[in-house]
Amino acid sequence: MNSINSKEIYDLKAPFAPGTYIELFLENNDDIQRKWGFFECDSQAKMQLLFVSDDYLQSFDSFSTLVDIDEDGELECNDDYNATLIEQENTNKIGFSLPLYRTKETKFEKYYIVVFAYEGEMPTLQDPYVIIDMSFRVGIGEDDNVTNGVNLANYPKNIQEWNQISHIQSVWDAVKFFECLSKKIGDTFTIMRENFFSFCKNNPQIAGKIAYIYYRFDLGSQSFIDSVENDFKDYQRDRDFYFQTCKDVLLNCPIEKNNPKTLKEKYDELMQGKKLDIAIYKNLISKIATAICEKLDLNLITKNGEIDFFQGDEEEWGEYYKRRIRVNENNLHDLKEIIKTMIHEIRHFYVETYYYPGQGILRGYLFYAHGFSISDDYKILFDGFYKFDDKERQENAYEIQPNERDARFVEKIIDFLG
């Protein structure tokens, strides 16, 4: 009988996180076109019932199609799970994201995905299948109300042992997990960022767990933050300090030493004008950036007092990299959004400069998240992770990671500019 397997970079005996990207293949490669699909089982008992009989299997209502064949013989891949054929027109090799949501999130003990490759309308017990343990959990509670849990009693000694862990209950557990990963990936921001994606490609099961930790331990949730910092609030106080410092600079710093007009007043003046003077806009933006960095004692690299400007596409706003702030001058017409972007990017600079492990649980969490940063270019591997904001807009893995949640919070200071 043909069987389903995966690359050696996956450990099918270890638990997977929801949303993880996985590739499977039939061991005996042939020319038969097959469909693919999976059953979800929220207990071991339910999973075992799948194999009682074909009638019982086909009566399950938790079946989802990954690859289907329509009436004309055309292959259809399910975008809901990012399903794709590894080799075009070859249904023996498939890649897809595990489902992100589980039923009974707070109640199950084991959760399984049973994947079938089949030829008929529905799978049968004669078709090849593989059982994936999707029991990896993070924190306590449902997805929209996650709280911090109890620390592990003993911590694994290496990545392989961490991969066997089925539940990271606390942020401190996550920090210890990331600490172990840093020994493999790198121990500085620069090295971690340079090596992170190649590590994830070679360790997609671990990559899925990192992204799922970001998804569950969400720095965009105040109730989650409060569950971690219920007393000292070290992270929140530092975040508020950054927020207030930026606000004070805008309100009180003069545009020039011999000119009492503040940066905020100059901003108001430009917003009332009808003509876009690029040189004046660049000057104000550079002065705001340098003033904030000086106040925060950040060694910003400038050229003759000016930050870096580039000409990019409309959707590009700016970036931070190695003590430099870069802004897209093609978007200078939206001065408020540019300043917002700059405050966001300086926050990355600030975290890179002042955050270290051991300073507090959430500061340590943000330190590692800043190094293990998911780029917006990391397609497929992290496409299974997303959330919806208050306006029902879908946010991707890049947007929900801690370092972006943190920077997006402090950029709200722009609201007071009007």
Image (cartoon, rainbow, N blue to C red):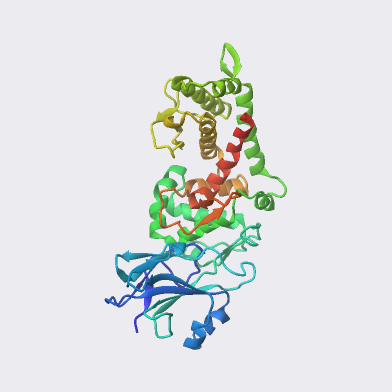
Q: Given the current orientation, which residue lies at the most extreme right position?
A: 231
Q: Given the current orientation, which residue lies at the most extreme left position?
A: 31
Instruction: Judge whether 233 appears above or below 297 on screen.
Output: below
Residue 186 visible (yes or no): yes
Q: Given the current orientation, which residue lies at the most extreme front position?
A: 72
Instruction: Judge whether 194 appears above or below 11 on screen.
Output: above
Residue 343 is situated, as x and y percent measured from the top left of the image, at 54, 34
In this view of the protein, which residue sits in the foreground, 55 or 381? 55
* Picture quadrant where residue 381 is located: bottom left
Residue 77 is situated, as x and y percent measured from the top left of the image, at 39, 66
Residue 357 visible (yes or no): no
Instruction: Judge whether 12 appears above or below 121 on screen.
Output: above
Q: Given the current orientation, which residue lies at the most extreme top position?
A: 258
Tell me the quarter of the image containing the N terminus.
bottom left
Looking at the image, residue 267 sits to the left or right of residue 158; the answer is right
Residue 370 is situated, as x and y percent measured from the top left of the image, at 50, 45
In this view of the protein, which residue sits in the foreground, 207 or 387? 387
Report the residue at 42% width, 23% height from top.
303
Tell me the quarter of the image containing the C terminus.
top right
Looking at the image, residue 138 sits to the left or right of residue 10; the answer is right
Report the residue at 52% width, 52% height from top.
394
In this view of the protein, which residue sits in the foreground, 325 or 58? 58
Looking at the image, residue 144 sits to the left or right of residue 98; the answer is right
* Picture quadrant where residue 11 is located: bottom left
Report the residue at 46% width, 36% height from top.
317
In the rendered picture of this protein, how many numbered marks are placed on residues?
A: 0
Residue 360 is situated, as x and y percent measured from the top left of the image, at 62, 46
Report the residue at 46% width, 33% height from top.
323
